[in-house]
């Protein structure tokens, strides 16, 4: 098979190479409350996708370290983190519209002002909207593990994505991953330990205890009662 050095070179030759995506689009029916939250709060807490870099000071009307979370689901833990850390700014990216609506509703109920949401592919957002060396922390909690071996290539944690994350983190910034699927945790550790410019923050081994800032979810509690594990990995950008 002919090899190409870049996406552009392949496209010039008329060959399509699939790109990494942060998601598989999941459609869902909005409740009336979720739709109302989108209508009422998106203008102040939503960020529309555009292929130009954000100015975080303008987005939040203040200067503060920025935490970005990819795939926040229904958003309860993201809202909790933002509520409990008012000294930080939080950006959440999710493509499941009911989750975006639910997150907006929860943020409004708690009067959380240090949170902004996006409904778009996170890889495109990182590439085109997030300035280099600008993030205090990037969070990836419980991404799709793609259990079947033939689907492992669809996992978001791959060398190309990790290098993109490194570029967007400030020196000293951290990439925090969590998963309840041990084979994926092992895959994450393998990819990250091979990645240039990162250092594992674990005192020993590959994994760390859940930090206080990551809320434990009902899903986790249920899994723990059934004997399921959860693995947290935190890597710091060194260069």
Image (tube, grey):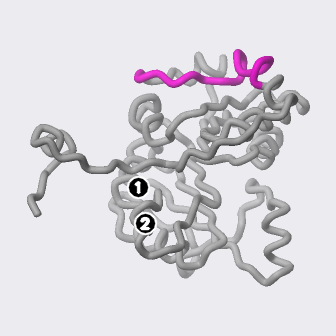
Where, by quadrant of the figure, is residue 11 drawn? top left
When the figure is inspected, residue 162 is found, relative to residue 128, above or below; the finding is below
In the displayed orientation, state which residue is furthest to the right: 109
Of the numbered discs in the image, which one, if any, rests on residue 162? 1
Q: Is residue 43 magenta?
A: yes
Of the numbered discs in the image, which one, if any, rests on residue 192? 2
Start and end of the magenta stretch?
A: 38-52
What percent of the width, then of the height, locates residue 139?
60, 51
Of the numbered discs in the image, which one, if any, rests on residue 115? none
Q: Are marks 2 and 1 in contact (CB under 8 Å)?
A: yes
Report the residue at 57% width, 47% height from top.
137
What percent of the width, then of the height, locates residue 74?
75, 45
Where, by quadrant of the figure, is residue 176 drawn? bottom right
Total marks in image: 2
In the displayed orientation, state which residue is furthest to the bottom: 227
Where, by quadrant of the figure, is residue 132 drawn? top left
Q: Nearer the viewer, residue 220 or 2?
A: 2
Q: Nearer the viewer, residue 75 or 199?
A: 75
**Residue neighbourhood size for the residue with mark 2, other residues' Cα within 10 Å, grouped as few (<14), some (14–19), many (≥20):** many
| Distance CA(mark 2)–CA(mark 1) | 7 Å
Determine the secondary structure under disc 2: helix
When the figure is inspected, residue 236 is found, relative to residue 109, above or below; the finding is below
Determine the secondary structure under disc 1: helix
Relative side of 84 to 146, left or right = right
Q: Is residue 161 magenta?
A: no
- Quarter containing the N terminus: bottom left
Q: Nearer the viewer, residue 89 or 188?
A: 188
Report the residue at 80% width, 37% height from top.
102
Report the residue at 81% width, 31% height from top.
34
What percent of the width, then of the height, locates residue 106?
85, 36
């Amino acid at each position: 098979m002919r090899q190409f050095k870049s996406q552009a070179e392949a496209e010039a030759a008329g060959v399509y190479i699939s790109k990494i995506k942060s998601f598989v689009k999941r459609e869902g029916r909005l409740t009336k409350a979720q739709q109302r939250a989108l209508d009422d709060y998106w203008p102040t807490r939503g960020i529309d996708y555009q292929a130009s870099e954000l100015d975080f000071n303008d987005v939040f009307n203040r200067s503060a370290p920025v935490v970005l979370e990819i795939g926040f689901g229904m958003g309860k833990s993201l809202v909790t983190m933002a509520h409990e850390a008012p000294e930080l700014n939080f950006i959440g990216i999710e493509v499941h519209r009911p989750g975006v609506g639910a997150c907006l509703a929860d943020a409004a109920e708690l009067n959380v002002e240090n949170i902004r949401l996006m409904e778009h592919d996170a890889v495109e957002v990182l590439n085109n909207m997030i300035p280099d060396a600008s993030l205090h922390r990037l969070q990836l909690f419980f991404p799709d593990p793609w259990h079947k071996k033939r689907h492992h290539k669809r996992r978001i944690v791959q060398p190309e994505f990790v290098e993109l994350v490194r570029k967007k983190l400030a020196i000293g910034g951290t990439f925090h991953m969590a998963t309840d699927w041990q084979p994926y945790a092992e895959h994450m550790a393998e990819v990250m330990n091979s990645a240039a410019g990162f250092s594992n923050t674990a005192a020993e081994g590959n994994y760390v205890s859940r930090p206080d800032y990551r809320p434990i979810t009902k899903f986790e509690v249920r899994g723990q009662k059934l004997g399921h594990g959860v693995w947290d990995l935190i890597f710091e950008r060194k260069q």
